[in-house]
Image (spheres, grey):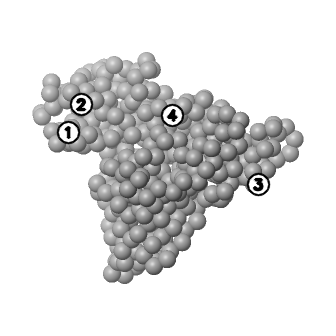
Amino acid sequence: MKPEPVAGEGRGELQRDLEALVPGGVYRDVPLSRVSRWRVGGPARLVVAPGTISQVQRVMAYVSSRGLPYVVLGSSTNLLFADEGLEVLAIHIGARLGGFRVEGNRVWSEAGIWVPAFARQLARAGLSGAEHTCGIPGTLGGLICMNGGSQRRGIGDRVIDVTSVTKTGEKRVRTREECGFQYRRSIFQGLGEIIVGARFRFVAGPSPSSVRKEMLTILGERRRKFPRKVPNCGSVFVSNPAMYAQYGPPGAVIERCGLKGMRLGGAMISPLHANFIVNQDQARAADILALIGVARRTVLERTGYDMAAEVCYVSPIGKITPAHLKAESLCVPESVSEVNGADPKPVPGLNQ
């Protein structure tokens, strides 16, 4: 987030109070299209970016005492912002909260560090165990919350404990066991707390160069498989183990349903990987939601499996909803035939 902090005349009471709590970290009318990995979204009226854990605590205590609505943002990798923008306060956990410290094979890191930078720091220290995260766009807090990773691995395996701030500004530390890590899940989803940092335990690799070589191999595979040069949020749909066992992962199933390359407005189901929706040409949130709706309905009709989106929609009042539920509430095309005028051909292996 790079706009200049706001100052001067015309500031409201909320803005002045936040500037006192977080000097130099308050921003006004921030285009969410600059923040979003999809490059979609209207302006955020007011954003505060704490630079220390104590500032996060003070901000949360302030908004709690006044009953103010807010939404917490990281790198917004898995968020789709409304075309209208964001009216409520946005609390941004990013580079200003990006401290990192190595002590032997243990690491302390604040939640705002960029995940690829986190992985590179570990490689420089010769520590192994997070190579699988090196190509994941996002902040560490979001990675922990989602127990994110790649190659069917999650960062939770390396966590010692996680520090978070409650809705009322209290600091809380939970052990790895208390975090409830499962595949792409943790206790923090829906808890309402802000992850501000974590301790990890890694292992010494053969050498820093060997760790870096492994990371380069992973990055090369991601470049070949994923659309990295066009704005996107990463994987749109969560992999369902039952559907995976019967038909394969979401991208393969969507492709076999004939939807790869489908376009609505400025959004497109990626021709490179069908579980990615890309912003091809000034896409709107409505375009992306429509494609999510079409893909989900078509897969349901042909396989009987109801895919859930891992990306979430953020409404103007800060309500965060799984994107597939938002897509259901809109008037989107019922099927691929309404988009391109013809049903896809029958696909062997999928129910007709």
The residue carrying mark 3 is 23
Q: Are marks 3 and 2 in contact (CB under 8 Å)?
A: no
Label 4: few (<14), some (14–19) or many (≥20) C-alpha neighbours in 10 Å: some
Front residue of 243 and 225: 243
Image spot of residue 75 (x, y percent): 53, 50
**Disc on the earlier residue, 1 or 3:** 3
Closer to the observer: label 2 or label 4?
Answer: 4
Marks 3 and 2 sit apart, C-alpha to C-alpha, by: 50 Å
The residue carrying mark 4 is 320
The residue carrying mark 2 is 305
**Disc on the earlier residue, 3 or 4:** 3
Front residue of 275 and 195: 195
Q: Secondary structure at mark 1?
A: helix
Q: Which mark is residue 242?
A: 1
Image spot of residue 184 (x, y percent): 36, 48
Kind of residue at badge 1: Ala
**Residue for point 41% across, 52% down:** 179
Marks 1 and 3 sit apart, C-alpha to C-alpha, by: 50 Å
Marks 3 and 4 sit apart, C-alpha to C-alpha, by: 28 Å
Label 3: few (<14), some (14–19) or many (≥20) C-alpha neighbours in 10 Å: some
Q: Are marks 1 and 3 in contact (CB under 8 Å)?
A: no
Horizontally, residue 238 falls left or right of residue 161, namely left
